[in-house]
Image (cartoon, rainbow, N blue to C red):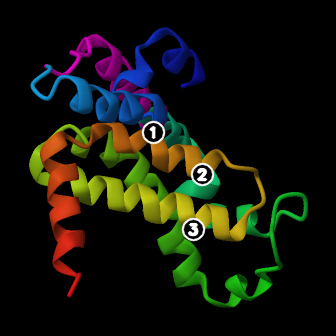
């Protein structure tokens, strides 16, 4: 993702520079047109994100621990990566199964659901729940936060505008 951000015009939309330039331009020229960003740049990032999630889920689906539902138990109890012991998960096998198969389901379905307006927000929510769950239980750096952030590129302007309107309704 860092490579894509380096070669793409990533500062044109949601960067501190773009906000400052818009404020400065509004003061000088109130009717200046917005800069256009080539479509191929975000599409390439979206495609790569879909590939990452799909093949991660596909690889998991091939493994025997993922198939029998115990992979999440072993992952969260790995002494090298776990934040705290979750040995109790062995006594709640159904929860380990849900965590395991849920991860595979999300990673196999999100790459497709992210592309459609009707399912996009659900897919982003599922990815966020998966990545935050991993972040809460495993100590493997900021990979999960990046995993959430890259799915946000699928949001369209209408989604972001609706979010800001929703936040504004809470003010009294």
Q: What label sits on residue 144 in the rendered view?
A: 2
User: Marks 3 and 1, Cα distance to the nearest angstrom?
Assistant: 17 Å
Where does label 1 land, which residue?
A: 150
Query: Looking at the image, is 69 positioned above or below residue 172?
Result: above
Q: In the rendering, at what x and y percent does residue 124 appear?
A: 33, 54
Quadrant in which residue 112 is drawn: top left
Looking at the image, the residue that sits furthest to the right is 80
Q: CA distance from mark 2 to mark 3?
A: 9 Å
Instruction: Identify the residue at image location x=68%, y=83%.
Output: 89
Q: Nearer the viewer, residue 112 or 33?
A: 33
Mark 2, residues whose alpha carbon is within 10 Å: few (<14), some, or many (≥20)? many
C-beta proximity under 8 Å, tags 2 and 3: no
Task: Kindly report the secondary structure that dominates the magenta region of the rendered protein.
Answer: helix
Secondary structure state at the residue bearing disc 3:
helix
Residue 96: horizontal and vertical position, in percent?
58, 75
Instruction: Residue under label 3, please give it.
Output: 133
Let me know if residue 69 appears in the view.
no
Kindly check if marks 2 and 1 are in contact, taking CB atoms under 8 A apart as contact.
no
Q: Residue at x 22, y 61 (%)?
A: 163
- Locate residue 94 relative to residue 157 in the image: left or right: right
How many marks can you see?
Answer: 3
N-term mark: 2 or 1: 2
Q: Residues within 10 Å of mark 3 (few under 14, many from 20)?
A: some
- Which mark is on residue 89? none
Within the image, what quadrant is residue 75 found in?
bottom right
Q: Is residue 114 in view?
A: yes
In the rendered structure, the answer to whether residue 172 lies left or right of residue 11 reads left
Quadrant (top left/top right/bottom left/bottom right) for the N terminus: top right
Residue range (magenta): 33-53
């Amino acid at each position: 993702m860092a490579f894509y951000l380096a070669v793409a015009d990533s500062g044109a939309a949601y960067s501190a520079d773009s906000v400052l330039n818009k404020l400065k331009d509004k003061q000088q020229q109130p009717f200046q047109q917005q800069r256009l960003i080539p479509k191929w740049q975000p599409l390439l990032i979206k495609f790569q994100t879909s590939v990452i999630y799909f093949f991660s889920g596909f690889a998991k689906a091939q493994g025997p621990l993922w198939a029998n539902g115990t992979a999440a138990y072993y992952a969260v109890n790995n002494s090298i990566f776990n934040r705290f012991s979750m040995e109790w998960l062995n006594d709640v096998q159904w929860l380990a199964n849900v965590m395991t198969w849920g991860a595979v389901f999300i990673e196999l379905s999100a790459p497709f659901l992210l592309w459609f307006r009707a399912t996009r927000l659900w897919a982003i929510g599922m990815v966020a729940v998966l990545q935050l769950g991993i972040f809460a239980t495993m100590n493997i750096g900021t990979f999960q936060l990046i995993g959430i952030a890259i799915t946000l590129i699928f949001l369209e302007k209408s989604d972001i505008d609706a979010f800001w309107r929703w936040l504004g309704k809470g003010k009294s």
